[in-house]
Image: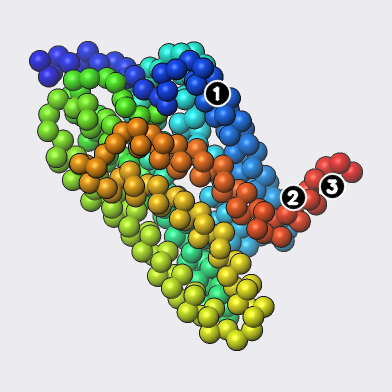
Amino acid sequence: MNSKNHTTISEFILMGLSEVSEVQIICFVLLLCIYIVTLLGNMSLIIAYIFSANLQTPMYFFLANFSFLDICYISSTVPKMLSNLLSGCKTISFYGCALQLYSFGVCGGTECYVLAAMAYDRNNAICHPLRYSAVMNKSTCIKLVAGSWLIGSVNIMIHTVLTFKLPFCDNKIDQVFCDIPPLLKLSCIDTWTNELVVFCTSGFVILCSFILINVSYIQIISIIVNVHSTSGMKKGFSTCTSHLIVVTIFYGSIMFVYLKPKSSNAMYQDRLVAVMYTVVAPLLNPFIYSLRNNDVKKALMNIGLSIWT
């Protein structure tokens, strides 16, 4: 019976945020606006980095890569959400679901370590300024980003293969996109092994990168508080505040979903949290970085003026 159910499932149904048609229209308009603003905001940061000579530093290299990740991250889920809301059809094919899970997971895992690389960069800039240019050279920056992509790819490949090898007895995913926890609930067999792998590997990816970030910032704060100059202390904190805000939003939401006990799962609550880290976080990131960074604002203004003139 389980084998039959498994072979006959060719598509899944995403339950979405609401069953009410009026609410779906509101959700579509909001999501579309958020998606467009997110694309424009992150693309503007990438353009600022590419075309501004003043931003050709490791800090902005990582920021540009993070913005590219955010574009890929939100594009892995939101277009399908918009399509389903507009058409009223909430289905996604079996292989489309697997692709969405993989692409979303790659971006999420990679972002964890890009954020860690950004913290490492700030650590070297503030704690070891004399060695900064030698340590954070172009080769090191590229290796850190490439390593982040490798970790994210390997991690989600394990989960994608293990998840879609399961026999499914139902095809209604109680989530707004294809994610591991709601997919495991559809399995006909016990998923204890899968849950253990999710907890261990996701815990490794999330917690290790989170620990690396914390270690970097503990060292940074210890240096800053010993600075006797008020202006120097203010400058030190200002360069790190934006990154810490992004880290708090991103890690807080994904830890809530992936590292909490199974018994505390409330799927509707998880839907709202999922929207937070898949839709809201990529929207906020470019504004957090650009509005708090005079160099980025000046670069964008200069690019704008050069276009008009």
Q: Where's residue 274, x and y in %?
A: 40, 38
Q: How far apart are the two marked residues, 2 and 1, measured between alpha carbons?
A: 32 Å
Residue 289 shows up from this direction: yes
The reply to whether residue 144 is visible in this rendering is no
Q: Earlier in the sequence, mark 2 or mark 1?
A: 1
Q: Residue at x 55, y 56 (%)?
A: 62
The quadrant the N terminus occupies is top left
- What numbered label is drawn on residue 300? 2
Image quarter where the C terminus lies is top right
Q: Tag 2: Cα neighbours inside 10 Å, few (<14), some, or many (≥20)?
A: many
Crowd rating for badge 1 (residues with CA inside 10 Å; few <14, some 14–19, many 20+): few
Which residue was labeled with disc 1? Answer: 26
Find disc 3 in the rendering and name its residue. Answer: 305
Amino acid found under the numbered disc labelled 1: Ile
Task: Indicate the secondary structure of the residue bearing disc 1.
Answer: helix
Q: Nearer the viewer, residue 282 or 231?
A: 231
**Could you tell me which secondary element the residue under label 3 belongs to?**
helix
Percent coordinates x, y for residue 183 in the rendering = 27, 30
Distance between mark 3 and mark 1 Cα atoms: 36 Å
Name the residue at 53% across, 50% down. Answer: 66
Q: Secondary structure at mark 2?
A: helix
Q: Is residue 29 above or below residue 226?
A: above
* Relative height, residue 71 to residue 84 (above, below): below
Q: Amino acid at mark 3?
A: Leu
